[in-house]
Amino acid sequence: MSRIRGKLALVTGASSGIGAACAELLARDGADLILWARREDRLRALGDRLAREFDVEVRIASVDVRDRDAVFSEAAATLAGRVPDILVNNAGLGAGLAPIHEGELDDWDRMIDTNVKGLLFVTRAFLPAMVERDAGHIVNIGSIAGSQVYPSGGVYCASKFAVRAITEGTSIDLLGTSIRVSSVSPGLAETEFSLVRFEGDEARAEAVYDGLDPLTGRDIAEAVSFVVNAPPHVNVSELQLLATDQRSVHHIHRRTS
């Protein structure tokens, strides 16, 4: 039984990977969708397919969550029609992998502006309407990197530690309302994440998952589906999921051929 059938879910970063998988499973559960991402062509193809396959309403918008004006403008247009019941803050990225003293400042800007400020912009744009209505569910896609730091990933990890703090702080701030706040924090997942981090270097990206069976975007989307379908009196505050071949950021089992 789906508890979100007929509800409206907004997913950021929905053009690929975890975001696209979340969109598909939320549509499978009967939710209408608003999909945001930068790549409008991918969004349109995904939205058309999900609308046909699951008979749900789908709206798309090309929005870069780093652009505060674009976020608030598109949010206002959305809220003029309908308040989302579910907000999945998925848009995020890793950029570069270098020790602090060799880090690229542009990479730091991209990660902080997307993973932290972008999430805050989107939350701030929609949360007041949820509070006014006293209903809603925010799901932030975190990472195991939000609780464990790995070499040369300090800034990315810091951005995900921030997501964890923002999630907990938002939940505390909303105590006494009916609004739920959750985080879903995966470990190694084979999406476009590594390809983006290594600027299209396919060999280097593939090596991240060499010899192991990583999570997929669908695995994480199934976790999001579980979280948003929990009974109204249940708030899954944090759900961390790892591949069986991974037990921490430092403990990964790789099979040799």
Image (cartoon, rainbow, N blue to C red):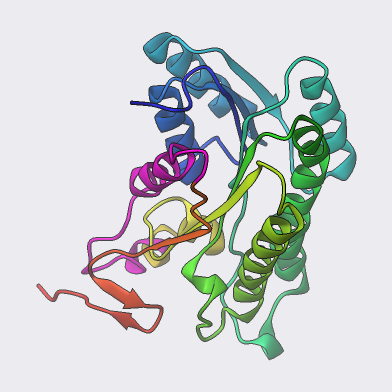
Number of callouts: 0
Which residues fall within the magenta stretch?
205-233
Please say if 187 is above or below 89: below
Left or right of 141 on screen, residue 251 = left
Left or right of 220 on screen, residue 169 = right
**Position of residue 146 measured from the top left corner of the image (x, y, whole percent):** 56, 71
Q: Is residue 228 magenta?
A: yes
Residue at (50% x, 80% y) in the render: 148
Question: Which residue, as the protein is rendered here, is positioned at the far left?
Answer: 257
Left or right of 182 on screen, residue 61 = right
Please say if 22 is above or below 121: above
**Position of residue 157 measured from the top left corner of the image (x, y, whole percent):** 60, 74
Question: Which residue, as the protein is rendered here, is positioned at the far right?
Answer: 69
Q: Is residue 24 magenta?
A: no
Residue at (65% x, 59% y) in the render: 167
Please say if 46 is above or below 233: above
Left or right of 77 on screen, residue 37 = left
Q: Quadrant of the N terminus?
A: top left
Query: Between residues 123 and 235, which one lies in front from this camera angle?
Result: 235
